Image (cartoon, rainbow, N blue to C red):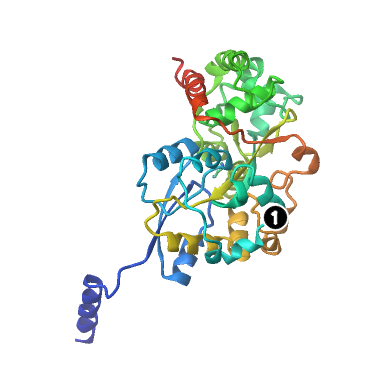
Amino acid sequence: MTRLFTGTALALSLGAPAFAQEVVHVYNWSDYIAEDTIRRFTEETGIQVVYDVYDSNDVLEARLLAGSSGYDVVVPTSSYLARQVPAGVYMPLDRSKIPNAEGLDPDLMEAVSAHDPGNEHSVIYMWGTNGIGYNVEMVRERLGDDAPTDSWALLFDPEVTAKLADCGISYLDSATEMIPVALQYLGLDPTSTAEEDLAQVSELFEAVRPHIRYFHSSQYISDLANGEICVAAGWSGDVLIAMDRAEQAGTGAEIAYTVPKEGSIEWFDLMAIPADAPNPDNAHAFINFILRPDVIADVTNYVFYPNAVPASLEHVDAEIKEDPSIYPPAEVMENLFPSPVYAARDDRVLTRIWTRMRTGR
Ligand code: N2P
């Protein structure tokens, strides 16, 4: 009898909620948050989170430019946000609703203000580097002990890639990253859009193309971990996730991450609120929660990317703080350049080069 009564009461309360449920729609990169971050946010605020993921700035940008994306919080890389801000894509942040932003590292915020003047529209979520993830044993078997694992040659020298083709090479599906690092490998300005420079990149791509198994920006995590591929152009934390998964699964695959000696990209991913966000207050609440030192430390511990909140470091695992793949040492930092900002008029030529690389046409 009692049980029946309880059941009825529950059914009634589900059918007719007394108030509208608060919600925030978050669109973030895949494999980029701790397991319990969302649950903790909802527990503390009562705000439900609808959480979607992408693995490409181009995909995110297309949705934002189309308008009415329905998203309240998005996480573009700063070089993309730089051209989205003038297009009116974001609302200025209301700092009074993000008190935890006080804890952001002023030097890093100053660095990203090159892409978001005055830091008006964004705060730093995570940052990292582009580099190469590889399976130590599989590469050694094919190239011996002097495999050029400290160089982009591992991905761009056709004599090297020919020997690795059978164990599987993957590239990020990202023209705006693979073209600059290819330019860097060729000894050219990585931000160049000069026709003669891009022609050299096309030629390079043509030579290595037959040796590349696929172009994808998140599949390589599990494939590296499982030994399905042996070399991947990737992002620091994602390669470390692969390393961690290989260890957890006990596959015995030893995965390493390297930032090539020729130099590479240092990028910043930022949290921002679309101008037409349906729930801007909840968006601010979400961003504020993420920036809490203990919360963002959990994310760093889980995804192996550094955040920009110094007070979080006391909650970050020692082995992460001491890992040079995550926090690059000074000599690596010196060789890094910020993700280039491309003007809309450059898109066509970059896309053409990249489409030919991906499809052969
Ligand atoms: C998340 C990778 C995001 C890094 N897994 C690219 N900005």
The answer, for residue 56, to whether it is visible in the render is no
Q: Position of residue 305 (x, y in %)?
A: 63, 49
Q: Residue furthest bottom?
A: 2
Asked if residue 97 is positioned above or below residue 350 in the image, the reply reads below
Badge 1 residue CB within 8 Å of ligand 1: no
Q: Residue 5 location in percent, x, y?
A: 20, 83
Mark 1 Cα-neighbour bin, 10 Å: few <14, some 14–19, many ≥20: few
Question: Which quadrant is the C terminus positioned in?
Answer: top left
Q: How many marks?
A: 1
**x 56%, y 49%: residue:** 270
- Report which quarter residue 78 is drawn in: top right
Check the picture and name the quadrant holding the N terminus. bottom left
Name the residue furthest right.
Answer: 331
The amino acid pointed to by label 1 is Pro
Residue 304 percent across, percent down from the top left: 63, 50
Secondary element type, mark 1: helix
Tag 1 residue: 106
* Residue 119 visible to the viewer: yes
In the rendering, at what x and y percent does residue 100 appear?
A: 60, 65
On screen, residue 283 versus residue 324, left or right, reads left
Residue located at (43% from left, 59% from top):
280
Q: Nearer the viewer, residue 237 or 145?
A: 237
Residue at figure coordinates x 66%, y 51% from the top left: 109
Image point (63%, 16%), residue name? 197
User: Ligand 1, what quadrant?
Assistant: top right
Based on the displayed image, in which of its 4 quarters is residue 10 positioned?
bottom left
Image height of 318 relative to 133, above or below: below
